[in-house]
Image (tube, rainbow, N blue to C red):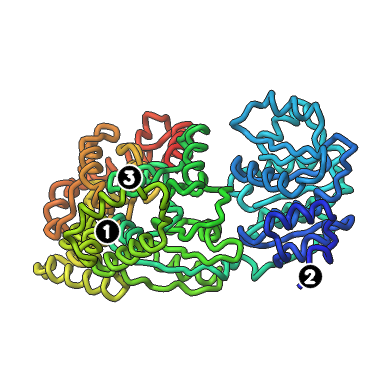
Amino acid sequence: MKTFEELGVAPLILQAIQEMGYESPMPVQEEVIPLLLGEDNDVIALAQTGTGKTAAFGIPILQKIEIGKYHPQALILCPTRELCLQIAADLNDYSKYMEDLKILPVYGGSSIESQIKTLKRGVHVVVATPGRLLDLMNRKTVDLGMIRNVILDEADEMLNMGFSDSINAILAEVPESRNMLLFSATMPQGIAGITRKYMRDPKEIVIGKKNEGNKNIRHIYYMVRAQDKYLALKRIADFYPNIYGIVFCRTRKETQEIADKLIQDGYNADSLHGELSQAQRDYVMQKFRIKNIQLLVATDVAARGLDVDDLTHVINYGLPDEIESYTHRSGRTGRAGKTGISISICHIKEKGKIKEIERIINKKFEKGEMPDGKAICEKQLFSLVDEIEKVKVNEEEIESLMPSIFRKLEWLDKEDIIKRVVSLEFNRMIDYYKDADEIEVIDETSSRREKREKGEKNGKNEGNRNSRKSFNAEDGFTRFFLNFGKVDGLYPNNLIELINKCVPGRVTIGKIDLRDNFSFFEVEESEAKRVADRMNGFEIDGRRISVEPAQSSKGEGGKNRNKFADRSTGDRKKWKSDSKSRFNDRETGGSKSEKPWRRSSSERQARKKRYN
């Protein structure tokens, strides 16, 4: 392994990084620094977060700055405000002894007038989010014509966030005679497009394997019923008393709900999502960085760019839709050579996702056993004992108080005092878990067995051929009957739009089973009553919707069919004919009034912005 001196790092920068505790280069630094110190070297570096990327590109671009020329010479693009500020802070630390070197972070949510004034005074390095930089370019207040180094940090994240057009517009204004470095944790197709268009014979550096997860991270999953997910989250948090991590949720609504529950249950938690103002985000992140918050509940978008080095855990409150998102989530822990744990709380339906993630990251998940109350209490007890053992005693401050305390407790022996101190802190946990029900970790075998037992229980009427096949909802879901079917032109996308139209907020939809004259669909048990209340009575061109819990007595040939489906042939043909304009009128250009279950484009965008 080479030293920083052998890599060619200048003395002033070397002095600064040594004071920061840098002893020897990390693998990505050893590979990238010599290339960026040269000329005409374009580099693609595939590496996880926490591998020393900022120093890898920051040290060489600072070293190549001509301080006497007050114009932007290096441009660093990154996806979020938080990462922008973090990179700028690190560069200022590396350049501590480089007098008059100016670094400007450019991001939304801050005064653009102030940024313009600083640009006019002259800066050497611009660290920017694409949106704000493009705004400054449109105002003709930043000149990229003399940029010598361009860095795209977390390029895959920027593409995921929709910055592709902005990046193209920015790179079009940068001189062709410059070094370009693209850092990414994964290699999606969009990045390949950027490399072909803007990079010249780039050298590819892969730390680990492409798209592979960090080697220092353990991957554990707990498969539980949907209704047990929050209880499982609490048990996991209790089993790791010194946990310091991020809980990832899918939507803003779920994020806020989980954070509120944790706070109510006495955990040091808070939420981070898109509905918070910038001031609120900054306040939450400040508390999290100084560890006043142990659990930060966040959406993927809100957590992008967070740079916190000491996370012990990442918890997936359900797996993300995109496998790349899992790689980014888990990469928040196990950074800078430390170990970390990525925990996923899953439902049986997500079993396939686990196998796919294992294939991509080239690591196996461990199947976790949910800790019982005894194990949790034991873990908490020894954590408390460790705190007592390591607490710093301020002899001078308490010296005058100790004689009175000794007299107060002199009737107790040492064992009694220890028991009372432990119980004072520990009774709440013991009382909670003393009567707590166990959470069963399910697998495919137990799930199939449960379904079979339920089917046998509900399928005593052997004449009803659909009783087992059609009416057994997945664990945690309620199955509903709907009086519309295929002959009405109903298809899964129509049914989903209908539910979204009738029921405000987020609804998790399970299996959809369409029949000729009627249909079945599943929703989470917690949402079942709200869905039924909202949908019943809703009309489509004068025909009322009827939604009822599916019962075995309501299969084909049962009560529901007699009630809603046994129309005369002529009547059915009339509904079938009418349905073509109700559910399949995309070609005919039906009016909005003919499609009451469909949202307008603006409504869909507003819903997407609010709930995703």
Q: Which residue is mark 2?
A: 2
Which element type, helix, strand or loop, lies under badge 3? helix
x, y percent for residue 463: 11, 68
Earlier sequence position, callout 1 versus callout 3? 1
Return the residue nearer the eye: 592 or 517. Answer: 592
Which quadrant: the N terminus? bottom right
x, y percent for residue 257: 34, 44
Residue 253 can be seen in this image: yes
- Tell me where residue 71 sits by quadrant: top right
Q: Which mark is residue 228?
A: 1
Q: Which residue is mark 3?
A: 263
The disc labelled 2 sits on which kind of residue?
Answer: Lys
Earlier sequence position, callout 1 versus callout 2? 2
x, y percent for residue 363: 52, 73
Earlier sequence position, callout 2 versus callout 3? 2
Return the residue nearer the eye: 284 or 416. Answer: 416
Q: Residues within 10 Å of mark 2 (few under 14, many from 20)?
A: few
Locate residue 70 relative to residue 87 in the image: left or right: right
**Badge count:** 3
Q: Residues within 10 Å of mark 3 (few under 14, many from 20)?
A: some
